[in-house]
Image (cartoon, grey):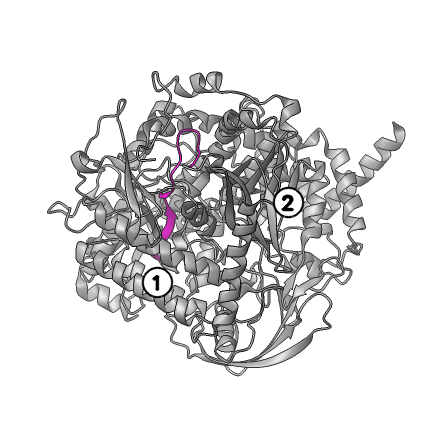
Amino acid sequence: MSASKALNLTLKVWRQKNQEDKGKMDTYQVSDISPDSSFLEMMDILNEQLIEEGTEPVAFDHDCREGICGSCSMYINGEAHGPGRSITTCQLHMREFKDGDTIFIEPWRAKAFPVIKDLVVDRTAFDKIMAAGGFVSVNTSGNTQDANAIPIEKSHADQAFDAASCIGCGACVASCKNASAMLFVSAKVSQLALLPQGQVEAKERVKNMVKVMDEEGFGNCSNTGACEVECPKGISIENIARMNREYLSASLKTEDA
Amino acid sequence: MTKLDSKIPQGPIADKWTKHKNEIRLVNPANKRSIDVIVVGTGLAGGSASATLAELGYNVKAFCYQDSPRRAHSIAAQGGINAAKNYQGDGDSVYRLFYDTVKGGDYRSREANVYRLAEVSTNIIDQCVAQGVPFARDYGGLLDNRSFGGVQVSRTFYAKGQTGQQLLLGCYSAMSRQIGKGKIKMYNRHEMMDLVVVEGKARGIIARNLITGEIERHSAHAVVIASGGYGNVFFLSTNAMGSNTSAAWKVHKKGAFFANPCFTQIHPTCIPQHGEQQSKLTLMSESLRNDGRIWVPKKKEDAQAVREGKLHPTKIAEEDRDYYLERRYPSFGNLVPRDVASRAAKERCDEGYGVGTNESGEAVFLDFDAAIMRYGQEEANVKGYHDASDTQIRILGEKVIEKKYGNLFQMYEKITADNPYKTPMKIYPAVHYTMGGVWVDYNLMTTIPGCYAIGEANFSEHGANRLGASALMQGLADGYFVLPYTIGDYLSDDIRTGAIPTDSPEFDQAEKDVKDRIDFFLNNKGQHSVDYYHKRLGKIMWNKVGMARNEKGLKEAIAEIKALREGFWKDVRVTGDAYSMNQELEKAGRVADFLELGELFARDALERNESCGGHFREEYQTEEGEAVRDDKGFTFVSAWEYKGEPSDAVLHKEDLVYENIELKTRSYK
């Protein structure tokens, strides 16, 4: 498709057998990569090459390959999801690189995300935070009230949507010097706090989610803002401010009671 | 089992579901606590079923191969979800949604199931809003709707181009609440390797822990398969890389019939393939056809110049453009159903009018220019700019389009490096969804007692072609509102059974089979990688069992797939070991199953001597190239029984009876 010529690249890839292994960077060469290929297609080509050579291919998480499942989690040249803004690794294309480039590929690095193998990390800490309160307590009955019974101000609905578009990839944690999960947690807290359906249990929610976030070993927020810059979905740190307000108000109210 | 019993309740269609719910047996809350249910897959169907079953009090064990249930591929659905709410007052009703779905499916779906789907569709929207799903709203604060292909009302609810994501996160939230309570035990990064049948009933599964490689036994009183469709049999599709048929195929091999495998949806609006290194295809939402106009040049020389990069499409004059959908189907225009739109694109490209820059020239334009100018003019009128220039109108119009489809336009630009506000998008059909799947009765139970299939994994509601925004509706209908009722009828026999032991000979055997297969893969030391075979299978499927099929091609495909399968078992190379994370081993198991399914798929297409919906046989078409159905010969569901090799599979027929809708030639002209 593109007139520009195929790329030859040097890859420095993190290899780690399992959680206990120390791990190291290995060097590989790939050639004849189309600039129209995605970064993960380039990784497929590397893996085919490794299999041919009888070496075990590089393990990495990926699934939808269209930027929405949040599986892919590579730290490329020192940036979560690599160069470019508002994209996941699967949406990164090789036209962003030049012939002869050396590319460094590492897993997310955070205490709460231990490496499972090579570039694959364990992000179940996010699921545990969600299970602590990332929901509205409503059962499925078939007789909840009509969906249009409560009009919701469009700006609130839109803001809730923007917060809800988080894909849970963990780039915010990987980019934060403190490995804080505040952007992730605040996105869910904000979404539900902005909607009337979520307000009923808003106070309990924010306290419970923050508690588990701390228990899981994520760091504190020092307002550096790296998370917002690297977030593939452009989740705003205004959500963190909103969560802090929610948390403060929840703490005060409870002490009153 | 020669005669299939669909267990459709008696009575008028509008009363069937209510009557059935009143008559089926229940399990009381105390007894539910001693009953275990396994759910495989955590997309919209599996996620909603797991959450609801746990809310009801059952002990749920949910499995997904991803690292979190939130990543199931339902997340990638863009456009929306249908519901017969009639909030727009444009004449919608349960009956009309039912009718549109049966007609859209080209009269190859089961009336009673479709009616029930339309009936519960309204509950889904209420439930999702109650969960905090942020659907699009208008300035009055009420829910907004848009229109999708094959219908003449606006009944599609949406959340920008991320409706599937928002609905799945709703399910995942509901699941998370039950996981926190301990009512759902979640098994992330686990793959179902086999179904365990004890005394004729589904009683558990063998699963592989994808981190440690450990083979585990899990028992339950019922097993629900919610593992999605099998579009990846084509290698290139819009499915996720990990989407596979293995769970569905394993239950098929244990006795569940597999229905209508040849009914596959080729979605008309996907980003064209860029080259041989491509790993998957990306969909552009059907909602774009609300405002985009599809065209190719009228002159072959213009098409060629575009392909060679010598002519910019915006330079082609209006009278030299062929808006072929508007020309052929004036009443539905660009919003004809997916199968019709896909075939029309293929027809133009085959004739030499394609505008793709890849080898085959396969692409057509999806153009927003007219919509941009129309919306821009509206905005100018509203704002009182009476002498706005074209440039100003264009800027206003682009803003409107950005609000509606911003994320889709951005996604397109990221992949192709073309700006779709300035130059028309290029699109081409790609494999997207499989209407076929595990055969189920009205209760969503397969031919194995206690084994259920829901969502895309079953064959039920969409007939030979699914309408846009109906997959999300079906997944959630099955999981939230249908299965949780119907499964109780079966489980009411199990209130005194107690926990199912996992030390039975059936579990021993199933585990041994799984381990033997893994050992085989790792010790085979062949020449070619798993992808080598998968890509070849995909090519055969796309070329001979794709958008247009004929007897000769299908016979060739059957022979070629068989030979490829034999080659795979002789010469596949799987690196790594059994007791650690091994993604090649995971792929090997899945491709092995695709290599069997592919052959049955081609055989099903060969047996069905008619054209209907997504199944187009070149021998059966009108002079104008429209599909010719054979209602006398083929108004039935093909349900295949496993007998070893795909060539030995036995065909059972479930006759489809239309009592409420008259069978007609589908026309969108």
Quadrant, the C terminus of chain B: top left
**Vertically, is A228 above or below B227?**
below
**Vertically, is A189 above or below B495?**
below
Q: Answer with the quarter of the image where residue B20 lies.
A: top left
Q: Answer with the quarter of the image where residue A155 lies.
A: top right
Q: Amino acid at mark 2?
A: Met
Q: Nearer the viewer, residue B154 or B244?
A: B244
Mark 1 or mark 2: name the one nearer the start of the chain: 2
Return the mark for residue B537. Answer: 1
Left or right relative to B624: residue A20: right
Left or right relative to B26: residue B373: left
Magenta highlight on residue B439: yes
At horizontal 16% and vertical 48% (from top left) the residue drawn is B625
Return the mark for residue B50. Answer: none
**Residue to which mark 2 is pinned:** B186
Q: Are marks 1 and 2 in contact (CB under 8 Å)?
A: no
**Vertically, is A140 above or below A103?**
above
User: Residue B532's spot in the image, x, y percent?
Assistant: 40, 69
**Vertically, is B279 above or below B609?**
below
At horizontal 37% and vertical 35% (from top left) the residue drawn is B461
Quadrant, the N terminus of chain B: top left
